[in-house]
């Protein structure tokens, strides 16, 4: 079982959508049994909340099931997850600070847009203070990035995926 964690700031916009898209693609590929995924935020702002209603609307528009309650990243996540995918450089910095504070190591910490071939920059823009179109933009970025991430997993775990 390969464990994948998606991380943003609040865990109500970007990372729960990424997790939902990833799970939906796994389902379509018949790979659900091989992976376990989750998402979380580096902040404690929205612990226990459902995804933002604009995130839910976006997932619905694309017919992607979404079911998550926000939670905060913790040190156990660093040990447990094989892949940690941060939505932006600030999230990645926060993750690195936790790794250092806890004297841990992590070999597979990425920005999710490192996998997007035509990315013009490496951050998934934070849509929280914007409108619906920001969420659609996030969806398009995540959809492309996750396709390529799955290809990466295929290469890295050939016998498995
Ligand atoms: P997310 O978006 O990190 O993609 O979940 C945000 C959600 C909430 C806040 C910021 C970003 N906030 O400041 O409450």
Image (cartoon, rainbow, N blue to C red):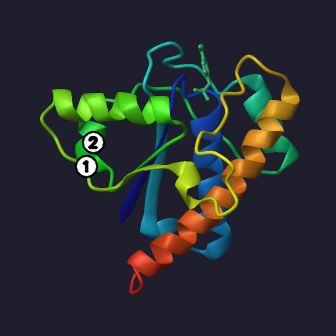
Residue behind mark 2: 78
In this orientation, does residue 67 appear? Answer: no
Residue 124 horizontal/vertical position (percent) = 63, 39
Q: Position of residue 136 (x, y in %)?
A: 82, 40
Mark 2 or mark 1, which has the lower sequence index?
Answer: 2
Query: Quarter of the image holding residue 11?
Result: top right
| In contact (CB < 8 Å): disc 2 and disc 1 | yes
Please state the quadrant of the image where ligand 1 appears: top right
Is 131 left, or right, of 13 in this rendering? right
Residue at 63%, 59% (x, y): give it.
116
The residue at the far bottom in this view is: 159
Asked if the beta carbon under badge 2 is closer than 8 A to the nearest atom of ligand 1, the reply is no
For label 1, the residue is 106
* 4 over 1 or under it: above or below: above
Based on the displayed image, in which of its 4 quarters is residue 131 positioned? top right
For the question of whether residue 29 can be seen, the reply is yes
Within 10 angstroms of label 1, few (less than 14), some, or many (20 or more) residues?
some
Task: Give the vertical position of 127 relative to 45 (above or below).
Answer: below
Separation of residues labelled 2 and 1 (CA atoms):
7 Å
Residue at 19%, 46% (x, y): give it.
Answer: 105
Which residue is rendered at x = 60% and y = 75% of the image? 30
Q: Position of residue 145 (x, y in %)?
A: 63, 57
């Amino acid at each position: 079982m390969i464990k994948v964690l998606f991380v943003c700031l609040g865990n109500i916009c970007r990372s729960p959508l990424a997790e939902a898209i990833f799970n939906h693609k796994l389902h379509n590929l018949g790979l659900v049994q091989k992976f376990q995924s989750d998402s979380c935020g580096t902040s404690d702002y929205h612990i226990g909340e459902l995804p933002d209603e604009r995130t839910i609307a976006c997932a619905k528009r694309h017919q992607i099931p979404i079911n998550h309650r926000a939670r905060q990243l913790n040190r156990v996540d660093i040990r447990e997850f094989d892949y940690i995918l941060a939505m932006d450089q600030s999230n990645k910095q926060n993750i690195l600070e936790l790794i250092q504070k806890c004297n841990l190591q992590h070999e597979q910490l990425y920005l999710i847009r490192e996998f997007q071939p035509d990315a013009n920059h490496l951050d998934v823009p934070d849509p929280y203070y914007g409108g619906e179109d920001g969420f659609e933009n996030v969806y398009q970025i995540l959809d492309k990035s996750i396709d390529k991430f799955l290809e990466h997993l295929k290469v890295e775990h050939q016998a498995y995926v």
